[in-house]
Image: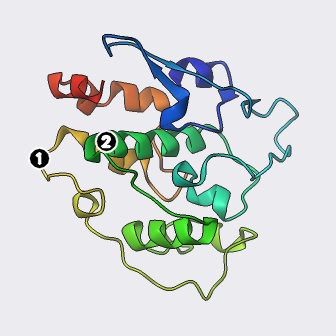
Amino acid sequence: MVYCHARRIIHRDLKPDNILLNATRDFAKVADFGMARAMQVFGPDFRYTDRLVTAWYRPPEIILGDSFYGAQIDVWSLGCILVEMMNLSPLFSCNTEIECLLVIFQFFGTPNEEDWPGVTSLPNYILQFPRWNPMEITAALKIPDDSPYRINSDMLDLNPNRRISAEEALDHPALQTPSARALG
């Protein structure tokens, strides 16, 4: 994704089915660019559709109706995929957008203006959302405290403006360790 994002391309539909591994599992390619778009090619006020990304890998800002987004949506999806690879099951196995959103809030806490400025003005945000406190990240993601995969807390930040970039993820110590090779 670093290559795509450096060229101002957002994939917008990252999921395990769109990541291809070679026979020795030491090289990955991203496939299916049917939903991909150039970032801000039409200027800063250009709105993207919020109908994209397979539900299990869809970031909260998309579910909440944000149409001004960037590469952070791909980083959220990649974080979900990394957790799925570690746990051998999807992080957010849900049937509807609202179900996915509520599960995300149960894990990471219901966002507010202090944590995520502007969240309450997103089209699908309702003040009556149940209020959950965030779980401890390792409990929420079902990973041990000493795991090198703490990168996921940086990739799965509810606030897209605090999420690390794909380049920062690639440089993260968790992906520099021998155990990162286990990700395939």
Q: Amino acid at mark 1?
A: Asp
Crowding near the residue tagged with mark 1, few <14, some 14–19, many ≥20 C-alpha atoms within 10 Å: few
Give the position of the C terminus as an image quadrant: top left
Left or right: 168 as drawn, with respect to 161: left
SS of the residue under disc 2: helix
Mark linked to residue 151: 2
Q: Which one is nearer the viewer's eye here, 108 or 163?
A: 108
Which circle marks residue 98 in the picture?
none
Residue nearer the viewer, 23 or 74? 23
Q: Residues within 10 Å of mark 2 (few under 14, many from 20)?
A: some
Q: Amino acid at mark 2?
A: Ile
Q: Is residue 158 above or below residue 19?
A: below
Query: Image height check: is 46 above or below 108?
Result: above
Horizontal placement of 106 versus 95: left or right?
A: left
Furthest residue toward left: 146
* Marks 1 and 2, how far apart at CA: 12 Å
| Above or below 7: residue 105 | below
Determine whether, in the image, residue 140 is placed left or right of residue 122: left
Image point (55%, 71%), residue name: 99
At x 43%, y 46%, the residue is: 80
Q: How is the image coloured?
A: rainbow
| Number of numbered discs | 2
Looking at the picture, how far across and down is residue 125, in whole percent? 67, 74
How far from the left and from the top, in percent, is residue 179?
17, 28
Coordinates of residue 113 in the picture (x, y in percent)? 57, 73
**Where in the figure is residue 152, as x and y percent of width and height?**
34, 46
Q: Which residue is under mark 1?
A: 146
Question: Which residue sits at x=28%, y=60%?
Answer: 137
Q: Secondary structure at mark 1?
A: loop
Q: Looking at the image, tell me whether mark 1 or mark 2 is earlier in sequence order.
A: 1
Residue at point 56%, 53% (across, down): 59
